[in-house]
Image: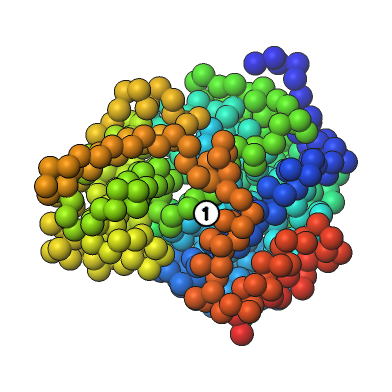
Amino acid sequence: MNDKLDLTGTLSTYIAGEQAARLPQAVIDKGKTHILDTIGAMISGSQLKPGRLILEFVKSQGGPTDATVVASDLRTSLIYAALANGTMAHADETDDAHFPTSTHPGSSVLSASLAVAEREHCSGKDLIAAVVLGYDVLCRTAKALDEKWMHDRGLHRGSMCANFGTTAAACRLLGLHAEQIRYALAFAGTQAAGLHTWREELEHVDKALARAGLPARNGVSAALWAQAGFTATPTIFEGSHNFIQSFSEKAQPDEIIRDLGVKYEILDTSIKIYPAGQPIQATLHGYFTLVREKNLNGRDIRAVLVRLPESQAQTVNDRLIPDTSCQHLLAVAMLDGKVDFQNSHDHRRIHDPEVIEFKKRVTLVSDTELTKKFPAVRAAIIEITMSDNRHFQTYVDRLPGAPYNPLSAKEAESKFLSLSIPVFGPDKSQAILESVRSLETMIDISPLCTMLQKE
């Protein structure tokens, strides 16, 4: 690291400055798509256990009515709204994923941004700029850290770095100046917490909190403390015992400010096409492609062999959470002929004898060549053997929704409607969609937030 670099100061100046708002049209369009996608994740997540629990908890806390809790009749403080919306957005595996860092920026960043923007009556253009900024800061901070060093010690990079993305977005929407933002970033660092222990929890509650709800809450808190005059160490990224040094051995601190305003991390972020963990997306796409193109009956399949990059294979190998288990979801796919929000979240089927029997037909292995391309390319090889010994194989390296093969606006909107309509109905869901389509023309986003409430 170049000790002369003022990383915290440079980043704080950028967060407060005009350059962060000068977005190319392609980035604005991508920002709107990810905002819509994340709202869909919040709405659908409200129906799952993490969503139901956080709604009840926030309801019990009382307090001011400054911000909307999505898919509910609740209004609460900025901090609790961010906590609730973030937890709902990552209540399952529907939200977006940043390929280079394996983080989920949308669920935390938008949750913090919506709460602040609503109270401050910010414009749609302001909201888009803050969200894009949040992705940039979250993902760059993650790139600066030594992920392997952290992982080997049980530390989760994504959870920790999400604090910085949410803080950046909240600070910009509050209009803080650079010196205040220095302090807010310090508060983001001192709140940093993230352990891989959530992997052992079976109902996605701890994961929803750790990866999105808590970082959203922490970022809003950090920004509000700085706005209120709280002071802190102004050198969180380069001072004595700084954040980067504390959590890395082979760090790359310069990544924090590299290509700010030139390269946008949201462009390297995927939108999932299935309500399942990101490592299973290519597998399911390959499976359904073969079934459709070869006119196969899932119940007549004798064996499925899946090859994935090593870390992805480990992540989804026979997990006890249904939407993150490769074997379980392929068994469901063979039996139901589809994977949708309902059957991918049906915990009862984990113990279904028929599902258990079909799981035995699935073999998952790690592949050396696919591992070499990871994480830039999330590829999978799927081989299907039928009961009559016919054999089919496909290689998926152009996953729809990936940064290098993005969904069309129509495809992303279709996904949103599939998640929103069961909760809000077709008319209201379409109205939300149309509002986000024209978000950059909106003078005040408060009416959109009101629309996100459930009567």
Q: Is residue 168 above or below residue 248?
A: below
Residue closest to the eye, 287 or 224:
287
Q: What amino acid is at disc 1? A: Asp
Mark 1 residue crowding within 10 angstroms, few (<14) / some (14–19) / many (20+) = many
Residue 175 visible to the viewer: yes
The location of residue 72, given as percent across then percent down, is 58, 77
Q: Quadrant of residue 270?
A: top right
Residue closest to the eye, 206 or 303:
303
Q: Is residue 196 left or right of residue 18?
A: left
The way the protein has been coloured in the rendering is: rainbow
Q: Quadrant of the N terminus?
A: top right
Q: Residue at x 24, y 34 (%)?
A: 365
Q: Residue at x 17, y 65 (%)?
A: 352
Q: Is residue 88 left or right of residue 134?
A: left
The location of residue 238, given as percent across then percent down, is 68, 25
Q: How many marks?
A: 1
Residue 168 visible to the viewer: no
The location of residue 434, given as percent across then percent down, is 71, 67
Q: Residue at x 55, y 70 (%)?
A: 420
Residue closest to the eye, 230 or 270:
270
Q: Is residue 60 above or below residue 17?
A: below
Q: Is residue 115 above or below residue 166?
A: below
Q: Quadrant of residue 370?
A: top left
Q: Is residue 175 left or right of residue 249?
A: right
The location of residue 166, given as percent across then percent down, is 66, 49
| Location of mark 1 (residue) | 95
Q: Is residue 391 left or right of residue 122?
A: left
Q: Quadrant of the C terminus?
A: bottom right
Q: Quadrant of residue 421?
A: bottom right
